[in-house]
Amino acid sequence: MDQRLEKTLQHARNRIAAGEAISGWISGSIPARLGNPRSDVDLFLLHDGSDDPPVQQIIDGAVRIDVEYRRPSEIDRLLDGLAGVPDDRTEGLDRVPSLARLDDAARLFNALPVDDGPGRAYVERIQAGEDALRRCRILRATSICASKSEDVRGAQEAGDRRQELEISGRLLLESLEAYLAGCGEYYVGHKWVFAKLRRTAHHEPVLRRLDALLFDVGLEDAETVDARVSLAQQLLAVAFTLGWHRPQAAEWAAQLPVRAGADVRRLDPQWVPIRYGSVVLLEGLDKNVHVQLTPQGLLLWALAAAIPATDLYPVFLKTMSNFSDELPTEGDVEEYISQLVERGLLLPG
């Protein structure tokens, strides 16, 4: 065990033995296997008092430990909040936990219990409810992306190139958070996004695209913003399809060419994927237009922008096994692509 975890575990057990807490867990980037040598450790202790003691920091040699107290009722509310996945569009996303609450939930999901008391039970409870955590994380990331997509459009209309690049970069990183949640990576924060990505299967083609679009760009690169928006749309669509029921979004990455190439379809940038229960939609940026698709249709929409046309049908068949044993013919797929163009979801050509 990491020395920092060992020292934190001893501090926790000492406080429980002294009656200062009833249970607890070690959280943060180190238990989540994301930390670096400078990372501190977060210790959460359960107590049954009326008021939470103040946050404390312990310095034990080279180890920094942040100590926070929580009441069981707070954790119960946190876990109950993960039931806020909407089943219908009329519910909206208001009941989906905030990013701060999802940060707490993800830390608990990755936590190391310090004893066999209530803390362990809470960790086991959230891990048993992983599907709800994953869907809430995807939905919250998507709500942020919808806002960023509007901001990108506004910057483009204003002709503010720097703002276009800044906002579209944030959009792409947040859509990557949705994709990573669809791969089973729930820890919140762009700080760790590439470390999380490198832990997913088949990550190399995704990483190459991100490198090209985030770091190898110039102020006057005309296609960068549109390419970022397109990749963000694809990442969201994959999260809502391959990553919704099981954390298998990386199956999409397994089908990608090593590098992004030509002979792919272009997505209309006005559309943002969203899902309410079994209902999959593309939502227009004005929020007044919604186009309902099947999950298979949404995945095909995303694949069309990533896979060359000559390879699209066999790749789509590979991914179809996630949805149905009934496989479409190549003519069926071509006809559906034509319908996507007619409905304004794919750009002509």
Image (spheres, grey):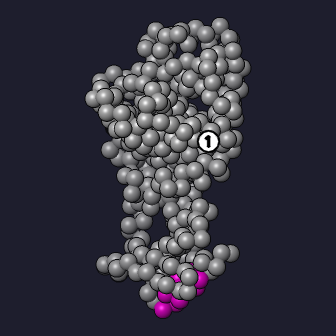
Q: Which of the 4 image quadrants contains residue 320?
A: top right
Identify the residue shown where x is 70% and y is 19%. Answer: 311
44 in relation to 98, above or below: below
Q: Which of the 4 image quadrants contains residue 317?
A: top right
Verify whether residue 210 appears in magenta: no
Side (left or right) of 1 relative to 142: right
Side (left or right) of 58 relative to 96: right
Identify the residue shown where x is 55% and y is 86%. Answer: 61
Q: Main secondary structure of the magenta part?
A: helix
SS category of the residue bearing label 1: helix
- Where is mark 1, residue-wise? 207
Q: Compare residues 38 and 138 and report the one nearer the observer.
A: 38
Residue type at mark 1 is Leu
Asked whether residue 79 is in view, the answer is: no
Name the image quarter holding the N terminus.
bottom right
Side (left or right) of 54 relative to 116: left
Q: Residue furthest bottom?
A: 18
Q: Residue furthest left?
A: 158
Q: Compare residues 45 and 284 and report the one nearer the observer.
A: 284
Q: What's drawn in magenta, residue-wise?
A: 7-18
Side (left or right) of 238 relative to 105: right
Q: Compare residues 170 and 179 and report the one nearer the observer.
A: 170
